[in-house]
Image (cartoon, rainbow, N blue to C red):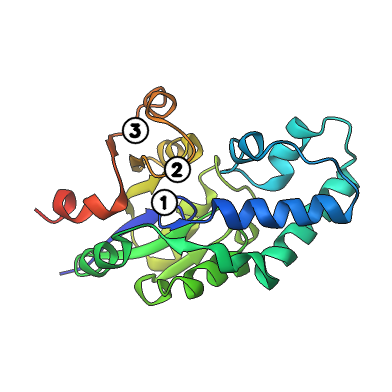
Amino acid sequence: MKKQLLCFDLDQTLVDANKAHTHSFLKAFKKHGIKPVSEKKLKSKFGRVTDQFMPELYPKMSKDLIKKVSEDKRKFFREDSYKYVKPIPGIKLALKRLRKKYEIAVTSNCSHKTILKSLEKTNLRKYVDKIVGSDDVKHPKPCPDEILKAEHLLHLNAEYMIGDTIYDIIAGKKSRTKTIAVLTGNHKMEKLKKHKPDLIIRSVADLPKILLK
């Protein structure tokens, strides 16, 4: 029997990376002499690529500086900050069970190398069949490109896009994929509900009992 495909976001869906990303951003801000915004405000923007949300935090910042901050942030993450990444509780067992029926793709707005670093740090890499990062496509989430590329690479149509932000839901709907929102991230129930995912669950850890009935 041919397996089906599940597309997962990474940060706050499979792994808890808030501290790691915050740490790497603060190091990049310090390097460029930028006054940091509050951690709460910074985390509220997570889910999109840096180039998309930095102009909202720093409206007067030049595109050139945004690019440099983004590059340094990724560098600091892979060199040091990744050590703060940890798996969401119950994820390893959930992915192990889901792989009996599904191919697993990670479709994330992190770069390909950053995704790989996080998966290796948390010992989740062996449960993932394909990685599609923001630098693997022309248009990252909330556009559907990452999901569509995973489908192309695995020669399967995605059954669900699973993630913790509204951008995962929007990308899923644009790719005509059913969506499952999880409550382990920075977007709360009320915000997620407004975008009408097919299902909202506490955590990916709860997914096997729903999909493997």
Q: Identify whether 39 is placed above or below 127.
A: above
Where does residue 78 sit, x and y in percent of width and height?
A: 66, 69
**Lower position in the chain sequence, tag 2 or tag 3:** 2
Label 2–label 1 contact, CB within 8 A: yes
Asked whether 98 or 91 is in front, the reply is 91
Question: From the viewer's perspective, is 139 left or right of 58?
Answer: left
- The disc at residue 185 is 2
Mark 2 is on which residue type? Answer: Gly
Asked whether 47 or 178 is in front, the reply is 47
Mark 1 is on which residue type? Answer: Thr
Mark 3 is on which residue type? Answer: Pro
In whole angstroms, how far apart are the C-alphas of marks 1 and 3?
15 Å
Asked whether 156 or 196 is in front, the reply is 196
- Judging by the rendered image, the residue that carries numbered circle 1 is 13
Dot 1 falls on a residue whose secondary structure is: loop
Circle 1 packing at 10 Å, graded few (<14), some (14-19), many (20+), is: many
Residue furthest out toward the left: 213
Label 2–label 3 contact, CB within 8 A: no
Residue for point 87% across, 44% down: 34
Residue mark closest to the camera, 1 vs 3: 1
